[in-house]
Image (spheres, rainbow, N blue to C red):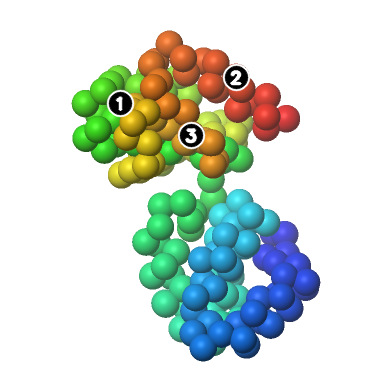
């Protein structure tokens, strides 16, 4: 496994934590930093974060498992979140989800054989006005139909190269 954080990142987070009355404020920043370097947050990352902030590992774990954009298990290079809110579902989200699973050959919580895509449902993307919507990484695609998925997946595959 890669180094969880660089020496510079560790020093930066230590310095920032020392200046805060409540260092736990940095837990999400640290989780994101570990995930950015490793693709997910392994147990060793939770332990490192707890150590840097002077909190129990369970406190970091509580935050990590609350947010669906923090991954505690390995995921593909690109994570596709599909909104399963009533707004998206009422505008074709169920058909979109079925088409996406068929095109990728995976179900929710699974990763494609090439390790490129992981498909996860999410309760809301904040894109109700663009329903139905998906998010790939941090990019949101809205007003989608199953027919548009091939173009979206091709774009994301190209960006992954």
- Tell me what residue is drawn at x 51 percent, y 71 percent: 27
* Label of residue 140 in the image: 3
Residue 97 in view here? no
Measure the C-alpha gap from mark 3 to mark 2.
Answer: 15 Å
For mark 3, does the 10 Å Cα neighbourhood hold few (<14), some (14 to 19), or many (20 or more) residues? Answer: some
- Identify the element where label 1 is drawn: helix
Decide which of 144, 38 is in the foreground and name it: 144
Which of the two marks, 3 or 2, is nearer to us in this view?
3
Circle on res. 127: none
Disc 1 designates what residue?
93
Residue 31 in the image, given as x and y percentages of width and height: 55, 64
> How far apart are labels 1 and 3 at the CA level?
14 Å
Q: Position of residue 95 (x, y in %)?
A: 30, 20
Residue furthest top in the image: 147
Q: In the displayed orientation, state which residue is furthest to the front.
A: 129
Q: Residues within 10 Å of mark 2 (few under 14, many from 20)?
A: few
Q: Quadrant of the N terminus?
A: bottom right
Residue at x 51% of width, y 88% of height? 21
Residue 31 visible: yes
Image height check: is 42 above or below 94? below
């Amino acid at each position: 496994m890669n180094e969880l954080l660089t020496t510079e990142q560790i020093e930066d987070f230590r310095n920032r934590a020392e200046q805060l009355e409540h260092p736990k404020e940095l837990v999400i920043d640290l989780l994101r930093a570990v995930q950015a370097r490793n693709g997910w947050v392994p147990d060793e990352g939770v332990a490192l974060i707890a150590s840097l902030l002077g909190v129990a590992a369970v406190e970091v774990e509580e935050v990590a498992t609350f947010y669906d954009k923090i991954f505690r298990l390995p995921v593909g290079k690109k994570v596709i979140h599909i909104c399963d809110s009533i707004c998206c579902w009422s505008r074709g989200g169920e058909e979109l989800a079925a088409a996406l699973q068929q095109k990728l050959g995976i179900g929710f919580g699974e990763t494609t054989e090439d390790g490129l895509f992981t498909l996860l449902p999410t309760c809301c993307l904040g894109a109700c006005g663009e329903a139905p919507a998906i998010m790939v990484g941090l990019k949101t695609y809205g007003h989608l139909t199953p027919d548009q998925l091939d173009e979206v997946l091709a774009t994301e595959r190209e960006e992954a190269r």
